[in-house]
Amino acid sequence: MNNEKLIKEDLAHIWHPCSQMKDYETLPLIPIKKGRGVYIEDYDGNIYIDAISSWWVNLFGHTNPYIAKKIKKQVDRLEHIIFAGFSHKPIIKLSKRLINLMPKNINKCFYADNGSSAVEVALKMSFHYYKNQGKKRLHFVSLTNSYHGETLGAMSVSDVGLYKEPYKEMMMTPIHTPVPYQISKKSAIAKAGELEKIFQQNPDNICALIVEPLVQCAGSMNMYHPLYLKLAYKLCKKYDIHFIADEIAVGFGRTGTMFAFEQAKITPDFICLSKGITGGFLPLAVVLTTDEIYGKFYCDYSEGKSFLHSHSYTGNPIACAAANATLDIFEKNNVIKKNLKKIKYIKNSVKKFQNLSNVKEVRQTGMITAIELKGYEPQTRIGLNVYQYALKNGVLLRPLGNIIYFMPPYVIKKNEIDKMINVAYEAIKSI
Ligand SMILES: Cc1ncc(COP(=O)(O)O)c(C=O)c1O
C-alpha cells in the first residue's frame, strides 16, 4: 500500500473538512500510516515533524505510550454509558481534577464531545440563566477576528469571514468589539474602552462576552496582552454580563500557563475546554462554571428551567481515561515549568526571521509562535508554498494565509525545534 493508491481510494468517497476538494488535484492528500512522538510517517515512508500538533490537539506526542496504555485499560472495562441518569468513575475523577485546577468559584462541569459544542453549551447556558430569572437577553458580544467553531451558534459569534460568509443570512446577529492587534497595554486599554461603549448602550440585552484568551488562533494567531482580559472582565462584572473564556485552543499549557485566563487573574463565568484535554487522542469537551449559575437551573422539573442539552458521546469513559492520563503527565512531569525552557529556546531561535525582508512580524505567546509575512496578496496563497517546501523537507506546517506558525507537541526536543525552525526559515527565504 502506498500513498497514491490510498489517495485514490480516499478521494472516491471522502469529502474532507475545511477543504476545497479541488485543491487536492495539485496539493495531494497525505495518508498517514503511523505516528510516534513529534513524528508522523506516510505510506511512502516519508517522515515529518508535526509542528502543529495535528490541529492543535496533541500535547505529549503521537501514540504517547502512557495515554495509550490507560485507554487500552478503559476499553476493556467500560466503553460507553448513557450520561443522563448514569455516571462512571473516570469522569468523576476527571471532574474533581479539573475543578482543582480552576479558581475557587468554578465548581461544576458540563461535558460535550467537541469544541464547537462546548461553545454552544456556554452560549445556551448564559442565555438560559437570564431567562430563568425572567430576563430576556438576546445578544452576545465577541471580538473581531474571533473563531469559536463551526456550528451555527459558535459561528454566529465568530468573525473569521472565510468560514462564516456563506452562511451569514442564517446567523444570530453578533455584536463585535474590536480586538487588540498588539501585545501591548496601550492597545488593551484602548480596546477595552471600545468594549465599554458597547456595554453602555444596552447592557440588559447582552448575555455574555466570549473571548479566546490571549491568542486568536484561527484568526491569524493574533495575540494580545492579558490586561485586555482583565479590563474586559471588570467591565463584564460592572455591567452584569457573563464572561466566557473559550480556551479550546489555548488551554492546557499552550500560552505558558495551564490556562490562558490565569495570566489575567480572573474567574470567568464559563470556561470551554477541548482539543488538548485528551492529549489529542479522543474527542471530549467540557464547560466549567460556577455554583451560582448552576443554582439558577436547580429546581423542580415542572418549573421548566432545566438545561436539557445533550450529545450521545457526552463524557465518554474512554475519552475521560485519556484526559485523566493527560493530567497525570502534567502532574508527574511538571510540564508547565519545563515548557518555560522550551519557550525561551524557541524565542531565541526565531529572532532570525526578523532579518528576512518578507517577514512583517514575529510574535510568540508561550508555546505558540507566529511569523507574519508581508508583501503578498491573499489570492497568491503564499502560505501554500511554505507548506509544500516544508513537507519536502520533513516538517508539517499548516500556514493560515500568510501566517506561518509553530504549535508543536510539548515533547519536542531541541534538535527537533531547530529543524522545525530552520526548515520554516529556508521555506520563507525561498519564496
Ligand atoms: C478557539 C476555538 N474555539 C472553538 C473551536 C472549535 O472546536 P472543534 O473544532 O472541536 O469544534 C476551535 C477549533 O479550532 C477553536 O480554536
Image (tube, rainbow, N blue to C red):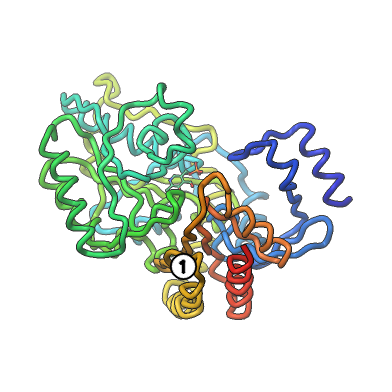
Of 226 and 179, nearer the camera is: 179
At a point 24% along the width and 58% down the height, the residue shown is: 104
**At 48% from the left edge and 36% from the top edge, which residue is drawn?**
163
- In the depicted view, which residue is nearer to us: 274 or 342? 342
Q: In the image as oriented, which residue stretches furthest toward the top? A: 302
Disc 1: residue Cβ within 8 A of ligand 1's nearest atom: no
Q: Position of residue 49 (x, y in %)?
A: 66, 66
Residue at the spot 21% in from the left edge and 43% down from the top edge: 292
On the image, the x and y values in percent for residue 151 come to 46, 32
Q: Position of residue 340 (x, y in %)?
A: 43, 77
Q: Is residue 395 visible?
A: yes
Numbered circles on residues, count: 1
Kindly identify which residue carries mark 1.
367
Question: Going by the image, does 255 lie left or right of 38?
Answer: left
Residue at horizontal 41%, vertical 57%? 251
Please tell me whether mark 1 sits on a helix, a strand or a loop.
loop
Using the rendered view, name the quadrant where residue 135 is placed: top left
Quadrant of the snapshot with the C terminus: bottom right
In-front residue for pair 90/256: 256
Quarter holding residue 334? bottom left
Characterize the local packing of mark 1: few (<14), some (14-19) or many (20 or more) Cα atoms within 10 angstroms.
Answer: many
Kind of residue indicated by mark 1: Met
* Residue that extends furthest to the right in the rendered view of this protein: 1
In the displayed structure image, the side of residue 265 where residue 285 appears, left or right: right
Asked whether residue 334 is in view, the answer is: no
x and y percent of residue 187 in the render?
23, 59
Position of residue 225 relative to residue 216, above or below, is below
Image height of 126 relative to 63, above or below: above
Residue 28 left/right relative to 323: right
